[in-house]
Amino acid sequence: MGTRRDNITGMERAQIAIKVMPDNRPYGTVIQLAREYGVARQTIYNIAEAGKTLMAQGMDPGRHGKTVEEKVIEVNQGRIERAVVVLTRFGVSQRDLPICLEEMLDTCRSSSWVNAQLAQREAMAAEVNQKWKPEIDEILSGDEIYSNGSPNLMLMGNDSLYIYTLTRQPACDGDTWGCVLLDSPATPQFASDAGTGLAAGAEEANIHHHQLDWDHLLRPLWGQSARLERQAYAALEAVEERAVLFKQAQTEKRLDNHLKVWERLNADACQKMVQFDQFRSLAKQVDAQFALIDPETGQLRDPAAAAAILRSIGQQLSQWKGRIYAKLSGNLTNWADHLFAYSPTLRKSLLPWIEQWGVSAFHALARLWQLETDAKRQPIPLALRPVQQVVWNQMLDQALVHLPFDALDQAWKSLNQVLTHSWRGSMLCECVNSLLRPILNSRKSSDQGCLELFRFLHNVHRFIRGKRVGFCPAELAGISLPVDPLTLLGLAPKCQSNSLCS
């Protein structure tokens, strides 16, 4: 009888191996197991040896971390064409594409073949982009980007991140961008930076609510605050260093010299600290107007009063010497009204919620939302966290007074959905434009076809993180896509370009 007896199961063999493998096993164990299973003692020894070998292999720690799954891929025409499109999507230049194909897929292709492939896919992308007409009511934002001396304009939805328009034009004046905006879908609000061309275009297109981007105001404001802080602390360090030198001096002349320098440095440090404190106070006043909700009352911020505060701060900064302060003063004075252009659209969007749940419930939950939003935007100092928690608990109790407990979660989610929209600028559009920049930089010359291909590939690319995870901009805009969107460009489905697909 051999070790391949079918009537001895795998579990029984494992138990035999476990009993026999120890060196200090009881005397007669092998004879007892041989009689129990009706096999020779050598068979028991063979089973124990096989179990020992398998256990050693299974318990081997091997390499740490995830192992790379090995696949055999057939490099065919479909896979090469798909590689050209995907590598272009992530900024590989036409000149470098043949090198990548040769290194990655062991395939030699000429630059002219790559250019012909891209031209074909760009033409098909333009056709698909033209056919797609999403009808979704969302805020549009626009941003200009220049390449090869020509302006390009991107119009994107702030909710779906769907690119509605990506066009190259010979000029960037109001008439040109006005025509582009007139051809774009109707929007309740249009957001952009403070560019004069886009502002003139929005006026030509008769867009009533043109929202300027808050980031273009706050970024230089807090940047200057950080610079003043560094200068103030550097001045204080210089004072301390001079004080050390004063203590080390031995002669009267050196003591007198160090004292004079210390007095001058100390006066300079005091001046810089005062300047920093004053500027930071003004910056905090500006930053406080960024909140959608008044944290004290729970009401939507009054745009007229908030704009007046910004203009007042701008007037104060106009007295400061320096080009950066002149710039900040001009921004605060000239942009004040357009920074709050979102207010009518936001009020209109909140009307259904207020009609359903009531004004008092809105004030309580809106204050809760603003508290949590501020905590995410800027960490709350440890000393203020207990106070913030008390206010948070009070607002929750107040909300429960006006809302049934079982309806609180639903009301909170619906309010959060409205308030978390991008109401105050075009930063999302500018972030997507930053993805286009390396592609334009990698091309010696670019045309409308290049923009059309980027627009298509962006609109069908699925998000891998964030609140839009698992969806692509086209789907969020209400467009139905095939399982493999690249087939719309005439490419073979991925399963046909991979020999392992069934």
Image (cartoon, grey):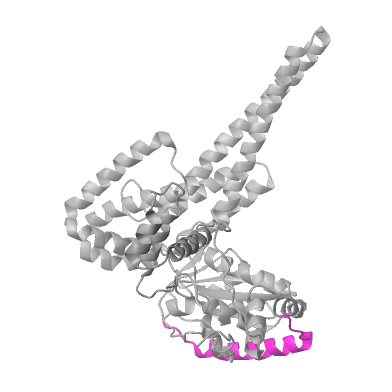
Camera-side residue: 282 or 230? 230
Horizontal and vertical percent for residue 230?
Answer: 64, 37
When asked about the image quadrant of residue 117, the answer is bottom right
Q: Residue at x 43, y 85 (%)?
A: 480
Position of 11 relative to 459 (above/below):
above
Q: Residue at x 54, y 75 (%)?
A: 155
Camera-side residue: 130 or 86? 86
Residue 110 in magenta stretch: yes
Position of 419 relative to 113 (above/below):
above
When asked about the image quadrant of residue 299, the answer is bottom left
Quadrant (top left, top right, bottom left, bottom right) of the N terminus: bottom left
Position of 226 relative to 246 (above/below):
below
Does 456 sit left or right of 114 as displayed? left
Horizontal and vertical percent for residue 442?
Answer: 73, 73
Residue 415 visible in rendering: yes
Residue 419 visible in rendering: no
Q: Residue at x 68, y 78 (%)?
A: 171
The stretch in magenta equals 106-135
Camera-side residue: 104 or 418? 104
Residue 393 in magenta stretch: no
Camera-side residue: 485 or 393? 485
Horizontal and vertical percent for residue 454?
Answer: 61, 79
Q: Main secondary structure of the magenta part?
A: helix
Q: How many marks?
A: 0
Horizontal and vertical percent for residue 226?
Answer: 61, 42
Does 307 sit left or right of 115 as displayed? left
